[in-house]
Image (cartoon, rainbow, N blue to C red):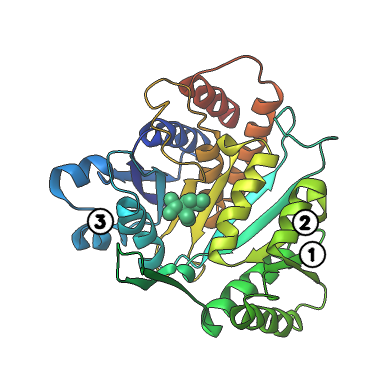
Amino acid sequence: ARSINLAVIPGDGIGQEVVTQGLKVLSAVLPQDVKLESRQYDLGARRWHETGETLPEAELEQLKSHDAILLGAIGDPSVPSGVLERGLLLKLRFAFDHYVNLRPSKLFPNTATPLEGRPDIDFVVVREGTEGPYVGNGGSLRTGTPAEVATEVSLNTAYGVERVVRDAYERAQARPRKKLTLVHKNNVLVHAGHLWKNLFDQVGQEYPEVSTDYLHVDAATIFFVTDPARFDVIVTDNLFGDILTDLAAAVSGGIGLAASGNINPTGAFPSMFEPVHGSAPDIAGTGKADPTATILSVALLLRHLGHEPEAARIEDAVSADLAGRSGARTTDEIGDAIAVRVAS
Ligand code: IPM
Ligand code: MN
């Protein structure tokens, strides 16, 4: 499209700082003839303290009119755990049917990894985003008593599993190695596990060029550390994907570099792009936050909207910037350096 109408939700903590850098790089990379409009939405901890609102219906409605959403981070120690997570972030993922939670991992040059020998890490996790234990289907009985019982039911539908598995096959097919790994725990979670495995095998018949394998999630965590180069595309459920992608970030440059896209591939609702990291209130306002994960999320946003050359330009600029990094730079300095590279 020759215009981008962006919604920006800076959120809490370092959210505003990293989003500012993401927008700086976005403006720098876009060609003159692509018109960029953006509107900021004041949502997060401060809004909740002032009004008790997390995401009012009116704003949810307005958000629908944008081409995409850029989100910084949400969460603050002054807000009870779960209020903003469920009431804002997960509400957006569910309301806008973000069933593909895309989380690429690549070990860029000159970046930290605790792994020996700098393995060639270049994989993408397709985390299901609208089902699993995240649906909030559960409850507790005799709450607060010694006899309390709590359930948290994982919801898995054939519809929901098939569409995310199919998306993962498409992504695997488009990559050079054409390899797809299903991660689950079907030796214990037999009901959901068999649904996933059966649909994985069934949809796979339509993608004969894609080679497949299956790993239990516990075994997968071992391979993330001992042999992450074996992975190309991974498809997994919402909770396994949440945990695996923090591990993926830890072995491939740290959480300061991990980008993500909450994608609705049908285009029925705007997709939302955000760094995997949280609001880091301990370093908010110090200029220590690394905006790179947000900048890489902007690349995913551009790719989703069909601006592939600009997306690639940002990724190349980040790679070059990381290769030359030495000593500490502020949030702003990193954003400036990458913006200069994408513009030239
Ligand atoms: C993430 C976060 C969220 C999740 C939280 C904040 C609800 O950890 O984006 O990975 O669990 O999905
Ligand atoms: Mn997480």
Residue located 80% across and 71% down the image:
212
Q: How far apart are marks 1 and 3 (CA)?
A: 39 Å
Secondary structure, mark 2, is: loop
Circle 1 residue? 179
Which image quarter is the C terminus in?
top right
Residue 338 locus on image (x, y percent): 57, 28
The three-letter code of the residue at mark 1 reads Lys
Circle 2 residue? 231
Q: Is residue 7 left or right of residue 300?
A: left
Q: Is residue 317 above or below residue 47?
A: above
Contact (Cβ within 8 Å) of mark 2 with mark 3: no
| Mark positioned earlier in the residue sequence (1 or 3) | 3
Q: Is residue 1 visible?
A: no
Secondary structure, mark 3, is: loop
| Mark positioned earlier in the residue sequence (2 or 1) | 1
Q: Distance between the residues labelled 2 and 3?
A: 37 Å
For label 1, the crowd category at 10 Å Cα-Cα, with few meaning under 14, some 14 to 19 and many 20 or more, is: many
Contact (Cβ within 8 Å) of mark 2 with mark 1: yes
Circle 3 residue? 55
The front one of 70 and 326 is 326
| Mark positioned earlier in the residue sequence (2 or 3) | 3
**What is the residue that sits farthest to the right in this orientation?**
117
Q: Dividing the picture into quarters, in which one does residue 272 lie?
A: bottom left
Between label 2 and label 1, give the one nearer the viewer: 2
Q: In this view, does 62 lie to the left or right of 102?
A: left
Secondary structure, mark 1, is: strand
